[in-house]
């Protein structure tokens, strides 16, 4: 295969988790600005969102900053489908011209006896990003998501 074709290839990651938390809380964490800034950046990164519009056709622009080096990359998210507590579909684009194309992300939420079943598929990952690195980043993000949504903290 030629180098030109290789640069056009994209990757896909699929993740599956069950979180012992109510589906409403897990779904909310995918649409709340402060929650996303907390849990979505993988280990070693901080996240910032200017503003978010949680509606179909809306979205947000987010920056991940490497805490050690200060290097930053930014991407935009556009919501294609929002079915409360059931499904979110969005497209993502990096601002970096070296990471072309559009990624499609589908998140399925299902209330189960012990909490929430979560299925995530991200496709169209630019060839420059190793799929296994993307998968590792998602695993780290989902660990942070669990730390946010699992604790049952009563109001005082």
Image (spheres, helix red, strand yellow):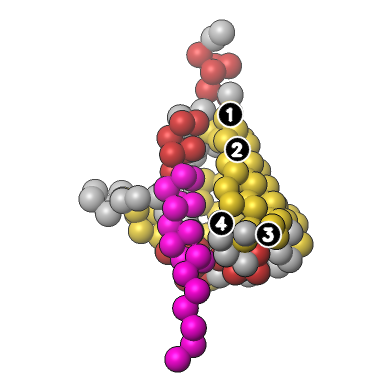
Residue 69 in the figure: left or right of residue 42 = left
Residue 27 occupies quadrant: bottom right
Name the outermost residue toward the left: 68
Q: Determine which residue is flagged by label 2.
A: 14
Instruction: Please tell me whether mark 4 or mark 2 is closer to you in this view.
Output: 4
Q: Determine which residue is flagged by label 3.
A: 113
Image vertical order of residue 25 relative to residue 134, above or below? below
Q: Is residue 66 visible?
A: yes
Precedes in sequence: disc 4 or disc 2: 2
Instruction: State the separation of the CA atoms marked 4 and 1.
Output: 29 Å
Q: Determine which residue is flagged by label 4.
A: 19
Residue 123 position within the rendered picture, expressed as x and y whole percent measured from the top left? 63, 37
Assign a secondary structure to mark 2.
strand
Instruction: State the separation of the CA atoms marked 3 and 2.
Output: 23 Å
Label 1 Cα neighbours within 10 Å, binned few <14 / some 14-19 / many ≥20: some
Precedes in sequence: disc 3 or disc 4: 4
Residue 104 occupies quadrant: top right
Q: Determine which residue is flagged by label 1.
A: 10
């Amino acid at each position: 295969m030629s180098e030109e074709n290789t640069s056009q290839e994209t990757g896909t990651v699929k993740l599956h988790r069950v979180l012992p938390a109510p589906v409403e809380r897990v779904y909310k964490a995918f649409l709340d600005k402060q929650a996303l800034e907390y849990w979505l950046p993988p280990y070693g990164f901080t996240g910032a969102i200017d503003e978010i519009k949680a509606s179909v056709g809306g979205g947000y622009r987010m920056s991940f900053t490497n805490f050690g080096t200060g290097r930053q990359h930014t991407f935009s998210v556009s919501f294609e489908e929002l079915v409360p507590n059931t499904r979110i579909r969005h497209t993502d684009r990096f601002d970096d011209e070296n990471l072309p194309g559009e990624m499609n992300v589908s998140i399925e939420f299902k209330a189960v006896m012990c909490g929430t079943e979560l299925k995530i598929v991200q496709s169209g990952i630019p060839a420059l990003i190793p799929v296994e690195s993307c998968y590792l980043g998602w695993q780290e993000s989902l660990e942070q998501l669990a730390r946010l949504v699992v604790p049952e903290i009563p109001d005082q």
